[in-house]
Image (spheres, rainbow, N blue to C red):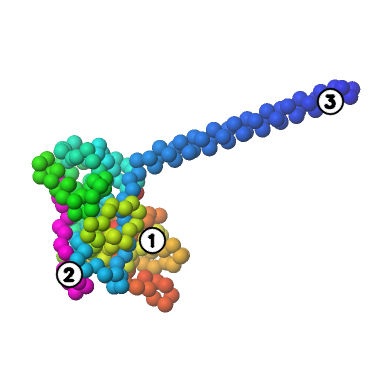
Amino acid sequence: MLKLYLTSQTNICIKKINNIKLCIFTLSFFLCFSQHLLATSTKNKPHFMLAHTWNEKIDTNNWWMSEKLDGVRGYWTGKQLISRAGNTFHAPKWFIQNYPSVPLDGELWIGRNQFSELISIIKTKNAGKKWNKVRYVIFDAPQVNEGFEKRLAFAKNWFKHHPNPHVQFIQQEICLDQTHLRKKLKEIESKGGEGLILRKPGSPYITGRSYDLLKVKSFYDDEATVIQHFKGKGRNADRMGSMLVEIKNGIRFKIGTGFTDNERKNPPPVGSIITFKYYGLTKSGVPKFASFLRIREQF
């Protein structure tokens, strides 16, 4: 009887050990597979040079100054045009014709205050002729091992000898002083532009945020989650008038300006992330004069 009992207990132990081995194997496989998925999902993600925010203490006299475009960042790998997330844009072959075999950094852009239309085009797999509205505005050639001016000259020279009508270059001018900077900022904003970009002369292309690249705007911006839509009145009676949003710290408030007619008819859905601009905070932390800029798109 004792022998039978011991045999039974031994079999139970063996089964438990086998189950533990199976669990360990399954967990190991899952971890390896997850790491593989993570690696494959991020391997094509480009590393952009990103701007810090300018302040008056920074001397930017004789820096390069250009308009900050409200488009979608695009990176030419030498073979394909991809987004910040590493996804390929569905651009027609004729759009990327004559591109070089070296990387380019730029922005897909239609024009000021036309972000929604741009998104509609670049997210559609078969947009075809609609891409005629889009321009690839080139800022830089990241892997040309020279200072900024020579990198940009390389890209310009390439397209001079290999033309593409859908390629443009951002206009650069020398920033003389803060008076010049503020005058230019006012000019761009009066035309519906978002702001300015300042770049240090001769600076290298450094991935990540760099103080060699600065953004200048007369307003702040932030992101918020859409909580609720409210029907409008008057000319907006049959569409959205405003929306309730929530920022990261949990504060909720309404945004009712900055929307185009089309955005009011088809507002950012509840749960989506939007970017808004504002001019400082109240004592309770609510953004002042908040106005819609765009929906955050993940590509």
Q: Nearer the viewer, residue 12 or 21?
A: 21
Amino acid type of disc 3? Leu
| Mark 2 closeness class: few <14, some 14–19, many ≥20 residues within 10 Å | some
How many angstroms separate mark 1 from mark 3 (CA)?
Answer: 65 Å
How many angstroms separate mark 3 from mark 2 (CA)?
Answer: 91 Å
Left or right: where 141 falls relative to 298: left
Q: Quadrant of residue 80?
A: top left
Q: Quadrant of residue 126?
A: top left
Camera-nearest label, 1 or 3: 3
Q: Could you tell which of marks 2 and 1 lies nearer the N-terminus?
A: 2
| Mark 1 closeness class: few <14, some 14–19, many ≥20 residues within 10 Å | many
Q: What element carries label 1?
A: strand
Q: Could you say where residue 86 lies in the image, as x and y percent from the top left?
A: 33, 43
Q: Which of 22 and 196 is in front in this view?
A: 196
Q: Could you tell which of marks 1 and 3 lies nearer the N-terminus?
A: 3
- Residue 149 vertical position relative to residue 277 in the rendered view, above or below: above
**Is disc 1 in contact with disc 3, using a CB cutoff of under 8 Å?**
no
Q: Could you say where residue 135 lies in the image, as x and y percent from the top left?
A: 17, 48
Q: Is mark 2 on a helix, strand or loop?
A: loop
- Residue drawn 38% across the image and 64% down it: 244
- Residue 195 vertical position relative to residue 83 in the rendered view, above or below: below
- Residue drawn 19% across the image and 48% down it: 136
The stretch drawn in magenta includes residue 75: no
Provide the residue designation for mark 3: 6
> Which residues are drawn in magenta?
166-188
Q: Is mark 3 on a helix, strand or loop?
A: helix
Provide the residue designation for mark 2: 176
Q: Could you say where residue 100 lies in the image, as x and y percent from the top left?
A: 19, 40
| Mark 3 closeness class: few <14, some 14–19, many ≥20 residues within 10 Å | few
